[in-house]
Image (tube, rainbow, N blue to C red):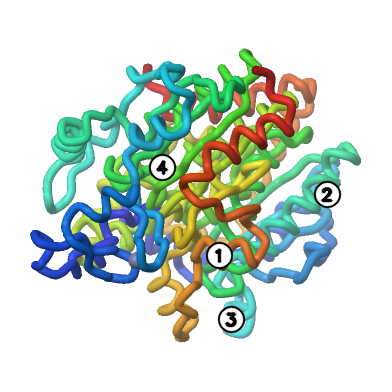
Amino acid sequence: MKAIEKVRIARDPRRPHFREFVKYVCDDFEELHGDRLVNDDRGLVGGLGKIGGFRCVVLGHNKGASVEENMESNFGMANPDGYRKAMRLASLAERLGMAVVTFVDTPGAYPGREAEERGQAEAIAKSLEFFSALRAPVVVVITGEGGSGGALAIAVGDRILMMENAVYSVISPEGCAGILWRDGSKAPEAAEALKITAPDLLSLGVIDEIVKEPKGGAHKNPKSACLAVKRSVLAQLKSLSKVPINELVDQRYAKFGAMGRFA
Amino acid sequence: MGWYEGKKEKSAVPPAKALWDVCPKCMSHFPKGKWKANGKICPKCNYHGRLSARERISMTADEGTFEELYSEVGYSDHLKFHDATGDYRSKIEAVKAKTGEGESIVVGKCAIGGHRAMLGVMDFSFMGGSLGTGTGERIARAVELAVKERRGLVIFSASGGARMHEGILSLMQMAKTSAAIGRLKAAGLPYISVLTDPTTGGVSASYAMLGDVNLTEPRALIGFAGRRVIENTIKQKLPDDFQSAEYLEKHGFIDRVVERGEMKGFIAKLLSYFGVSK
Ligand SMILES: [Zn+2]
């Protein structure tokens, strides 16, 4: 399948969103709100979830399932407040012996005036530094669109899973085509060149596992797609729970340190 | 995150360029030579113009102390990337030949006002200062060595963001560099970040914004998203000083806007406050 076809599937509005993943992956979930500073971002949401006996902090981009929710959440484009909320909640995991599970699905961080004024760059940067050193197991699932820094901010973890038709990229194919091809309609070429599909990222060492989707894509059978994610997340949580926390944090550091090291 | 080649506003420079120096910020014209003579600072608006990595190093490191490291670490063409205008390898090889640099950052150890420092300086003329795997690797290694040798870390950033031509692994350099800096801080060493014109995209959203002290120069452009992207999203015009050094200071993300002539002395003073040994 061409990369651009995967982009279309990854962005399909019928594709399972955060709420559906929570419904099928978690045995129980309670949302918690706010960054304790200025706001409760709706593009990045989170709370407490139980997954097969594991007590977890669950975070994810929320594109929304209705037009109202789409608008409220900026289609899953988080504000700095979202990243700060994510750090606040994830720090509970460190203190209270929980794991962190994140669901990544965003076109990118929100490009807005207030987002810049409240430090979008700083919030993402801090998030990268924070998750790199977090003393709790972190399992990341790229479920749809992994849109550059806005995705990576909650995608630094011990195991990175990616759904079969998800994409993960440094820049959107349209954005890349607009700059390097000077023609946004060359997005299919850019998508191919950027190597953004799950098999590409597996071979580049950026992800650890590909989660299979129902034939035709996750939207054809959201429940079965979510349950496949649950099985993989659970297996990873089990294997991570056996690793002493110091080792885990060192391994995470080494994992990202090795990315793009060719010498 | 990486749209450095999109910055084509520069092409608005009038043809009179041969006779005049033009400030790229306020478009004021000066007799040829005046720009350089004034340290690439605009006499009219005080915009602090871009410098090469070598110029910056020579005005920051104590004379004769800079020892470059990891110059053998360079770009990687693991995607065999090519676009409508050609392939990445030939483009970057041309940039290497033109600039004499091997990557968009130069790192090395030095003394600053006598203090033991690890210095990294980005060069915007090298692929728009884009963050590639070589850039990230040079930074990570330098930061790790700074921890071992108990050096204060100083990085001057100048970048349009992550380098598209190296795909997802460029993005991962944001995580790698931020993780390394986290470890330096945990080891009780300070990091002084200087965000020079321009520092945007994936570089502002990683190591550049993580300073214990964040400094910048007058009128530098600093931000995450591009101005036009934001205007298109919110359907509003933004204030003229949006994403300027002074604007970020006002909003709490920059500690100080420092004049170029004062920069070295101020960094040395910070290293002294932070107890970095001589
Ligand atoms: Zn000027």
Q: Going by the image, does B209 lie left or right of A185?
A: right
CA gap between label 2 and label 4 equals 32 Å
Q: Amino acid at mark 3?
A: Met
x then y, percent, for residue A46: 75, 59
Residue at (64, 37) in percent of width and height: A157
- Figure label count: 4
Q: Mark 4 sits on what residue?
A: B168
Q: What whole-number distance in Å separates the C-alpha atoms at marks 2 and 1?
A: 46 Å
Of discs 3 and 1, which sits in the foreground? 1
Q: Quadrant of ligand 1?
A: bottom left
Look at label 1 and name its amino acid.
Glu
Which residue is painted at 80% across and 52% down in the image?
A89
The residue labelled by disc 2 is A50
Question: Label 4 lies in what chain?
Answer: B
Q: Are marks 3 and 1 in contact (CB under 8 Å)?
A: no
Q: Marks 2 and 1: same chain?
A: no
Q: Residue at x 33, y 71 (%)?
A: B26
The kind of residue tagged 4 is: Ile
Left or right: B188, with A207 as reference point: right
Front residue (pair A98, B228): B228
Q: Write down the quadrant of residue B9 in the picture.
A: bottom left
Report in which chain the residue with disc 1 lies.
B
Cα separation between marks 4 and 1: 33 Å
Q: For the residues marked 3 and 4, what is the alpha-carbon distance in whole angstroms?
A: 29 Å
Q: Secondary structure at mark 3?
A: helix
Q: Tell me, for residue A71, which label it has, or none.
A: 3
How far separated are the C-alphas under marks 3 and 1? Answer: 32 Å
Closer to the camera in the image, B29 or B214: B29
Residue A179 vertical position relative to residue B113 in the rendered view, above or below = below
**Residue A92 visible in the displayed image:** yes
Q: Looking at the picture, which amino acid does disc 2 mark?
A: Lys
Task: Give the mark toward the camera: 2 or 1.
Answer: 1
